[in-house]
Amino acid sequence: MVGRRKRRRKIIVRKRTLPKVFTCPKCGARSVVVKIRTGPSGRVAHVMCGHCGLSADIPISPIHKEVDAYCKFADMVYAGEL
Ligand SMILES: [Zn+2]
């Protein structure tokens, strides 16, 4: 083993912030955005794909975040509800 040097590559890991853009379960583009609004009937997440236009309003509970709404959205797509 000659000449094997360990090179330190600087990899910038940014995991502190949750992703706000998700992959579309329908078209596969990374252009799904989630916007959470608080209305009179509770919190509603508006999930929309900027690529294929697939969108849904998903009621969520106060503990849920964007990613949870996206998971529900993806489930609905896979279940054929959207
Ligand atoms: Zn899409």
Image (tube, grey):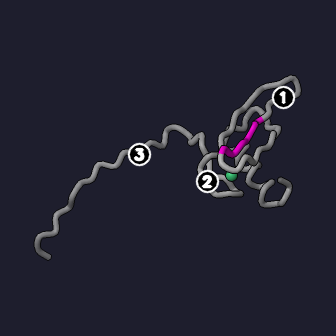
Q: Which residue is mark 1?
A: 42
Q: Which residue is mark 3?
A: 13
Image vertical order of residue 42 relative to residue 72, above or below: above
**First to last magenta residue range:** 45-50
Q: Position of residue 25 (x, y in %)?
A: 69, 56
Res. 29 mark: 2
Q: Position of residue 52 (x, y in %)?
A: 70, 50
> Residue placed at 44% from the left, 42% from the top?
14
Res. 58 mark: none
> Residue placed at 76% from the left, 32% from the top?
62
Image vertical order of residue 80 relative to residue 70, above or below: below
Q: Quadrant of the N terminus?
A: bottom left
Q: Secondary structure at mark 2?
A: loop
Residue 64 figure quarter: top right
Residue 8 figure quarter: bottom left
- The type of residue carrying mark 3 is Val
- The type of residue carrying mark 1 is Gly
> Residue placed at 41% from the left, 45% from the top?
13
The CB of the residue at mark 2 lies under 8 Å from ligand 1: yes
Q: Secondary structure at mark 3?
A: loop
Q: Residue furthest left?
A: 2
Q: Main secondary structure of the magenta part?
A: strand
Mark found first going from the N terminus, 1 or 3: 3
Q: Secondary structure at mark 1?
A: strand
Q: CA distance from mark 1 to mark 3?
A: 35 Å
Disc 1 crowd rating (10 Å Cα; few below 14, some 14-19, many 20+) is few
Disc 3 crowd rating (10 Å Cα; few below 14, some 14-19, many 20+) is few
Q: Position of residue 58 (x, y in %)?
A: 81, 41
Residue 48 falls inside the magenta stretch: yes
- The type of residue carrying mark 2 is Ala
Q: Is residue 10 left or right of residue 17?
A: left
